[in-house]
Image (cartoon, helix red, strand yellow):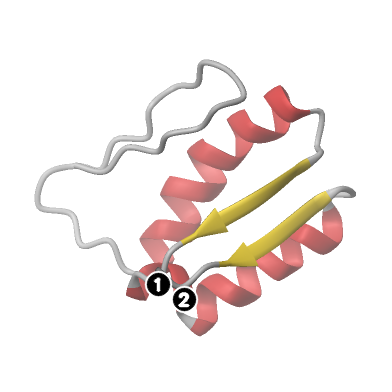
Amino acid sequence: MSVAVVSIAEMLLVLVQTGSKVNSSYYCDVVLNDGLLLDIWKLSDNNFIFQQDDAPAHCSRHAVVFLHLLSNQKIGCQIAHVKL
């Protein structure tokens, strides 16, 4: 199970079903689009920096394109890719 930790406010947890394969499609469609990013946008007044690590689902071509398209649609959203 994966859990996101943020410091701006209380958020709903985005839980990954046991046995689910978190590939880039699942990560973008379920974790980000249907969960995590919706809460972040509501709580941050659309002004935030989204950082993630080098997990395969995070740095896949699909995820990178998805996040850049979203950042172009949402004013103030910045995407940062951090290698840990």
Q: Tag 1 or tag 2, which sits nearer the N-term? A: 1
Identity of the residue drawn at 19% across and 42% down: 1
Q: Which quadrant of the structure image shows residue 58?
A: bottom left
Helix, strand or loop under label 2: helix
For mark 1, does the 10 Å Cα neighbourhood hold few (<14), some (14 to 19), or many (20 or more) residues? few
Identity of the residue drawn at 72% across and 69% down: 68
Query: Residue tagged by mark 1?
Result: 54
* Residue type at numbered disc 2: Cys
Identity of the residue drawn at 51% across and 38% down: 36
Point out the frontmost of discs 2 and 1. 1
Rendered position, 36 above or below 9? below
Cα distance in 3D space between marks 2 and 1 = 6 Å
Helix, strand or loop under label 1: loop
Q: Is residue 5 left or right of residue 6?
A: left
Q: Position of residue 8 (x, y in %)?
A: 62, 24
Rendered position, 43 above or below 6? above
Image mark for residue 59 = 2
Q: Which quadrant of the structure image shows residue 64?
A: bottom right
Rendered position, 46 above or below 74? above
Whether the residues at callouts 2 and 1 have beta carbons within 8 Å, the answer is yes
